[in-house]
């Protein structure tokens, strides 16, 4: 009896190594190995063996490890010098800065809304104070008006 394995993941990110006659030809990454990119047949790069390495869903991390593998293993169809430059961009401080920028972009609108609401509240508090002072003055005037009116009525 055959068993069918169902994968619960929709996307299965991998870094793939393509070999021909036990020589490494190409290293690449894909966010979904089920699309068949690692197994694609091409005229300019023959393949007889493919090795899949499960990796992170984070694109930056996948690109980093792809560049590291290319620089260390030096496949025939790729130029490692291009990837040395890429590795310079993956300095931990730069990665942290990119993450911080992404977080700032994500929460910028929320912070802006909170600040506008805070400004509106301050404005409302000021207007309420002004109105309270105005009503106190009116009340005093009306109270005085009533006293004067009663005096006039009493004097008659």
Image (spheres, rainbow, N blue to C red):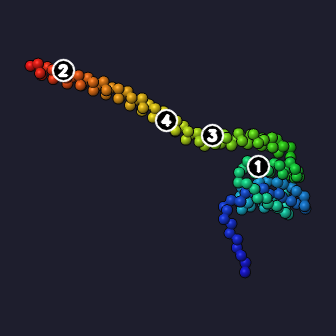
- In whole angstroms, how far apart are the C-alphas of marks 2 and 1? 87 Å
Circle 4 — which element? Answer: helix
Q: Label 3: few (<14), some or many (≥20) within 10 Å? A: few
Residue for badge 1: 63
Please determine whether, in this image, residue 122 is positioned above or below residue 59. above
Q: Residue at x 90, y 62 (%)?
A: 21
Q: Residue at x 84, y 54 (%)?
A: 26
> Which mark is on residue 104?
3
Q: Label 4: few (<14), some or many (≥20) within 10 Å? A: few
Residue for badge 2: 148
Q: Quadrant of the N terminus?
A: bottom right
Q: Label 2: few (<14), some or many (≥20) within 10 Å? A: few
Circle 3 — which element? Answer: helix
> Tags 2 and 3 in contact by the CB under 8 Å rule?
no
Task: Give the mark toward the camera: 2 or 1.
Answer: 2
Q: Earlier in the sequence, mark 2 or mark 4?
A: 4
Q: Is residue 43 visible?
A: no
Residue for badge 4: 118
Q: Label 1: few (<14), some or many (≥20) within 10 Å? A: many
């Amino acid at each position: 009896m055959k068993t069918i394995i169902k994968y619960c993941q929709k996307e299965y990110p991998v870094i793939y190594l393509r070999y021909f006659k036990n020589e490494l030809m190409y290293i690449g990454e894909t966010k979904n190995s089920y699309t068949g990119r690692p197994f694609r047949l091409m005229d300019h790069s023959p393949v007889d063996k493919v090795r899949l390495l499960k990796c992170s869903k984070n694109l930056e991390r996948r690109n980093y490890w792809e560049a590291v593998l290319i620089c260390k293993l030096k496949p025939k169809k790729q130029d490692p010098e291009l990837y040395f430059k890429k590795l310079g961009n993956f300095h931990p401080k730069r990665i942290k800065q990119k993450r911080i920028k992404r977080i700032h972009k994500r929460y910028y609108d929320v912070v802006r809304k909170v600040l506008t609401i805070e400004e509106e509240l301050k404005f409302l508090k000021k207007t309420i104070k002004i109105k309270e002072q105005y009503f106190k003055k009116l009340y005093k005037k009306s109270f005085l008006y009533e006293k004067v009116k009663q005096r006039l009525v009493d004097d008659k």
